[in-house]
Every structure is written in C-alpha cells, then in structure tokens.
Image (spheres, rainbow, N blue to C red):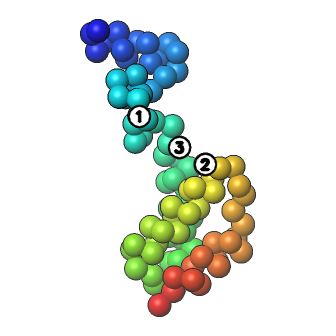
C-alpha cells in the first residue's frame, strides 16, 4: 500500500499511521505541546522568582509529573508543585 494511502487513512479515520504499520503508537501522536511549554515556563518562572536552584534532571522529573497529571485530567495546584520542588531540592 502506498505511504500516501496510509497517511490519508490515518487522517480520515483519525488513526495513528505507525499503529497502522506496526501496531504501536508514535511518540508524538496526541501530545499537547502547548500545555507542555506552559508547564515548563510556569515552573521556570517560579524557580527564578523564588531563587530556587535544582538540577536539570530533577526539573525534568517535575515537568514530567505535572504533564502526566495534565494528560490524565488531574488538576495540579500550586501546593502540589511546591511539594514536588521541596522533594528534589538540594
């Protein structure tokens, strides 16, 4: 089947093309990159405003947890974020 036909089927039926080919989801399909950018900028602003320094991998862990909550439809409060920061502070 031509690739163009697979892409057209994916768009028409809202199916992920890698799933059609391999039975797996692609990495980027369905991600809310605007929400991810907002989460990262909000966290960075808070860390800067409060003068808090954390390692980049720990920052990434907070962003990942926050984004996972967003994807699952759970509200993240400021208290949640403050708790996560306190858990990873040096």
SS class of the residue under badge 1? loop
Q: Nearer the viewer, mark 3 or mark 2?
A: 2
Q: To which residue does mark 2 refer?
A: 71
State the residue at coordinates (44%, 18%).
Answer: 10
Q: Nearer the viewer, mark 2 or mark 1?
A: 1
Percent across and percent down for residue 9 are: 43, 12
Q: Nearer the viewer, mark 1 or mark 3?
A: 1
Q: To which residue does mark 1 refer?
A: 24
Q: What's the CA distance linking mark 1 and mark 3?
A: 19 Å
- Give the crowd class for mark 1: few <14, some 14-19, many >=20 residues within 10 Å: few
Residue 19 vs 58, above or below: the answer is above
State the residue at coordinates (69%, 49%).
Answer: 73
- Give the crowd class for mark 2: few <14, some 14-19, many >=20 residues within 10 Å: some
Of callouts 2 and 1, which one flags the residue occurring earlier in the amino acid sequence? Answer: 1
- Give the crowd class for mark 3: few <14, some 14-19, many >=20 residues within 10 Å: few
Q: To which residue does mark 3 refer?
A: 32
SS class of the residue under badge 3? loop
Horizontal side of residue 52 vs 7, given as left or right: right
Of callouts 1 and 3, which one flags the residue occurring earlier in the amino acid sequence? Answer: 1
Q: What's the CA distance linking mark 3 and mark 2?
A: 8 Å
Q: Residue furthest left?
A: 2
Of callouts 3 and 2, which one flags the residue occurring earlier in the amino acid sequence? Answer: 3
């Amino acid at each position: 089947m031509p690739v163009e036909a697979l892409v057209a089927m994916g768009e028409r039926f809202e199916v992920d093309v890698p799933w059609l080919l391999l039975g797996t989801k692609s990495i980027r399909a369905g991600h809310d990159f605007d929400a991810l950018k907002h989460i990262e900028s909000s966290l960075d602003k808070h860390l800067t405003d409060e003068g808090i320094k954390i390692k980049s991998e720990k920052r990434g862990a907070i962003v990942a947890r926050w984004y996972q909550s967003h994807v699952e439809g759970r509200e993240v409060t400021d208290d949640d974020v403050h708790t996560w920061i306190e858990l990873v502070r040096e």
